[in-house]
Image (cartoon, rainbow, N blue to C red):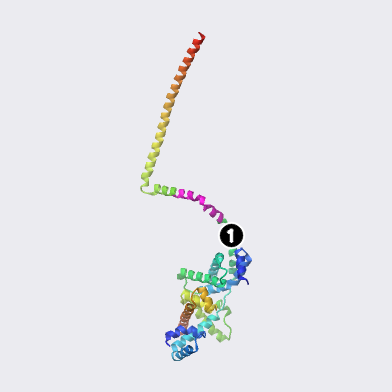
Amino acid sequence: MTCQRIEELLSAYLEGELAAAERAAFEAHLAVCPGCAALANAMKDTMAAAASFPEVEPSPALFARLYAIPEEKRERRRPVRPIFEGLTRPALQPVYAALTAFIAVLTFVLFHPEGQGIRKKINVGLHRGIGTVEKLYADAGVIKGQVGALAGNVVKSFDALGLSRADEKKQ
Amino acid sequence: MDLDAIIRDCLDGSQDAWKTLVDAYARRIFSMAYQFCGSREEAEDRTQEVFLKLHGALPKYDFGKNFTAWFLTLAKNHLIDEYRRTKWEKTQRDDFDERVLAQAAGGGPEESLVAKEAQAVVWEGLNHLSADMRMVIILRDLQGKTYEELAEILRLPLGTVKSRVNRARVQLAKVLQERKGELA
């Protein structure tokens, strides 16, 4: 038996699991190999030491923390759940999508180097739009005046016609 | 103790059932954590995390299975994961002092001294083993689990478990030999 094989069989030997023939060969090797015999003794000592290892009692404070786990979990969930559930409603998904798109566009316009040009275009467009609207209002005022004048003339004409007819009837 | 009934009551939100479960397993898990981490404070934190995980995992427990083995697997995985995540911080174990030796082996004063010395070497030697090796020694030699129980907890074939235990013991025995050589 080699020293390597002895090392592999040490636990089985110390736990009495080797067959008689194997055990005899094992012990024959130990008798002539002080290194393996010393290792076997050391393993025997560590196993005995480990088996009699004292058990350390957990503190009462730890027990209290362990008992409190379900209640703590319930407490932790309570305030968070309604908010969380409210925010994860599927109905809010389009809102989040629109908000995300808006933020993306806004970020691009505000912080991207090309954003300045875009802002300028928006300003120009906005001012042009305002100018067009003002012009439309002004034109509308002129048309209104013209229509008013025309309407006045028409009324006057009708009045004149009406009066002349009434005069004819009287005669 | 009908464990299945206790677990069902826990799932129904019974505080008494949870307390029973804690009383039944806290010492075992804490001992395992303490022997693995080597620090009482850290062992208390790890034990609390293991029970937190247990509370979250209870709805997934398969009632046909061995609860103790399932729970110890959960604890073992957590301890090893946390060790690997933060092992750069782990350089020292608590001194093997009166706190650890509170219930040391009996016998005469001389025998007790030798036993304490060997225990101190085992305690220190655990730090020289990898997380997997350390765990098998704790489960097999410190906690006295059978090889079959170990195979169930580690989810490994029996032969693999036996050879892993043997390799861990050889490593630990060599640490003991070195220490004896240093002292001689």
Whether residue B117 is in magenta: the answer is no
Residue farthest front in this picture: B64
Quadrant of the image for the N terminus of chain A?
Answer: bottom left
Residue A100: give x, y in percent of width and height: 45, 50
Q: From this viewpoint, is residue B182 visible?
A: no
Q: Chain of mark 1?
A: A
Whether residue A98 is in magenta: the answer is yes
Residue located 45% across and 84% down the image: A7
Query: In this rendering, is residue A164 above or below A9?
Result: above
Q: Give the main secondary structure of the magenta stretch.
A: helix
Residue B183: give x, y in percent of width and height: 47, 84
Query: In this rendering, is residue A44 above or below A158?
Result: below
Residue B113: give x, y in percent of width and height: 54, 84
Structural crowding at the residue carrying mark 1, measured as other residues with C-alpha within 10 Å and reported as few (<14), some (14–19) or many (≥20): few
Q: Which residues are magenta?
A: A81-100
Q: Which residue is mark 1?
A: A75
